[in-house]
Image: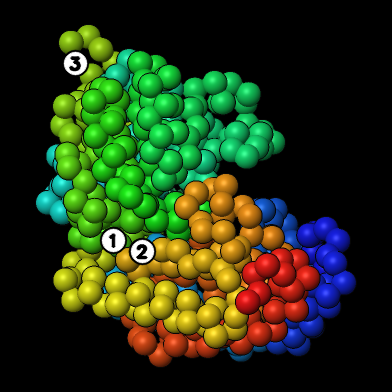
Amino acid sequence: MHDVQGELPPITAKVNEAMEVEFARRTPKSQAAAAKHSVIATGPRGAAYGPYSIWGSHAEGCRIYDIDGNAYDDFSNVATALIHGYAHPTLGQAIFEAYCKGSQLYGFRSAYREQLAEMIVERVPGVEEVIFSCSGTESDMYAVRIARASSGREKVLRFRGGYHGSYDPLIGYDPGPWPGFPKSAADDVVLADYNDIDGFDKALMDHGPELAAVIVEPVLGTGGYIHQRGGFLQHVREATRRAGVLLVFDEVVTGFRWARGGAVERYGIDPPADLVVFGKIIGGGTPLGAVGGRADVMKVLVGRDGRLPVIAGGTFAGNHVGCAAGIAALELLTAEAYDRLDRLGERLRAQLKDALRAAGVVAQVTGDASVCAVHMTSEPVTDARSAATAPPPLGRLVRMGLMNRGVIWSSGGLSSNTVMTEAEVDHASEAFASALDQIRPAIGELAPHMLE
Ligand SMILES: Cc1ncc(COP(=O)(O)O)c(C=O)c1O
């Protein structure tokens, strides 16, 4: 039943075995399905939560159901995208109406696209113009291309542990090289550590004149919701400005989740980022992405004075179904909705810390706004290096322990949505406390210094 995870030491192996037995007891139909060959090639996260992938049946509100009839409170929210949960009737209606009016009028301007773009411009500081894509990855790719065309330079500085989708230069060599990525992808990338002001300044000093852009996630999302410390983001803003390097905020996770105007607004970044990348929430549960920016930077998208335009966009970029869902999703994000999302996030962070304290386990809770993560390490987590000090089996055991107790979290951690209540948050905290109790012997074996 074991998946690929290397040899576990004896006590940890026993805890793992008990969890896998419980996992299998709860999900016999999924296990039977897993035994059958699938023609779908499984990606690296195929069995993220246990020894095999659970077969989902349907989802509604903040809950996913599997074919064995188990219900899971979903704190992954499709990697933070579904801020209004599953099958929200308002979004469903908007999607249906847009589809019935023609899902995409290729080559035409349309009210759907214009309205969503206007809503983005109105909400996000510094954004004057917008282009659409179909995903966060695509948007990051276009942002880099726009920055290169605008600056006439090629290199991009990004932070270790940051995630910007799967575009070659933004992922290939950290910690890769991953198979299939060209060696040349590394040539145009400069790496620095998140939250390390001195290291960043040095990298900027060494490479500034070659840099088209610095790209940063305001919170290291997939890297474990690691939040900024000591005014890091404002420092990056001021330093890039002084160096004449464009700053790209990858707000695929934080955009419209951190605040109406995203992390730029919440952290009062002044002047705002030069380019902002969006995905997830702006599609209202459908695949949509966008890049917004200052008009003088975005102008390279239009060919002028004999210059060719930057190539961006695609068949379904800015399709009406996605835009209609995005409009409805943003309209539902009222001041009360943000207040509620943040309160649930704060409650969860506080309760996870309480659970660790009560169990006498020294570990780290990171996050801000409506997201949080637990890092099973005694070292304060401020960047990718400190996050990597957590022994990998512990994270997997926590994840499987929560799954066995009907709670899902994603690779980054846990996020709340607008249809959750305190009851789901309390359930997640109780599940964590109970899983921690089960995992304690493994902690004692793998990292005894974490036990008080
Ligand atoms: C910060 C960030 N940027 C980009 C992406 C890629 O977005 P997508 O999965 O829509 O391609 C993600 C996805 O999780 C992300 O978290």
Residue at x 66%, y 74% (from the top left corner): 451
In the rendered image, the vertical position of residue 370 relative to residue 208, given as above or below: below
Q: Earlier in the sequence, mark 1 or mark 3?
A: 1
Q: How far apart are the two marked residues, 1 and 2, measured between alpha carbons?
A: 8 Å
**Is residue 139 or residue 443 the one in the foreground?**
443
Q: Which residue is found at the position 17% from the left and 71% from the top? A: 334
Q: Which disc number belongs to residue 258?
A: 1
**CB atoms of marks 1 and 3 within 8 Å:** no
Q: Is residue 117 left or right of residue 417?
A: left
Q: Nearer the viewer, mark 2 or mark 3?
A: 2
Q: Nearer the viewer, mark 1 or mark 3?
A: 1
- The amino acid at mark 3 is Arg
Regarding residue 428, the answer to whether it shows in the image is: no
The numbered dot on residue 230 is none
Quadrant placement of the C terminus: bottom right
Q: Which residue is mark 2?
A: 368
- Identify the secondary structure beneath mark 2: loop
Q: Quadrant of the N terminus?
A: bottom right
Alpha carbon separation for disc pair 2 and 3: 42 Å
Q: Which residue position is annotated with label 3? A: 304
In front: mark 1 or mark 2? 2
- Using the rendered view, name the quadrant where residue 257 is placed: bottom left
- Amino acid beneath label 2: Asp
Badge 1 vs badge 2, beta-carbon distance below 8 Å: yes
Q: Measuring 16% from the left and 71% from the top, which residue is drawn there? A: 335
Q: Secondary structure at mark 3?
A: loop
* Quadrant in the picture for residue 295: top left
Residue 43 as seen in the image, left or right of residue 167: right
Residue type (three-letter) at the residue carrying disc 1: Trp
Q: Nearer the viewer, residue 368 or 173?
A: 368
Of residues 281 and 319, the one nearer the viewer is: 281
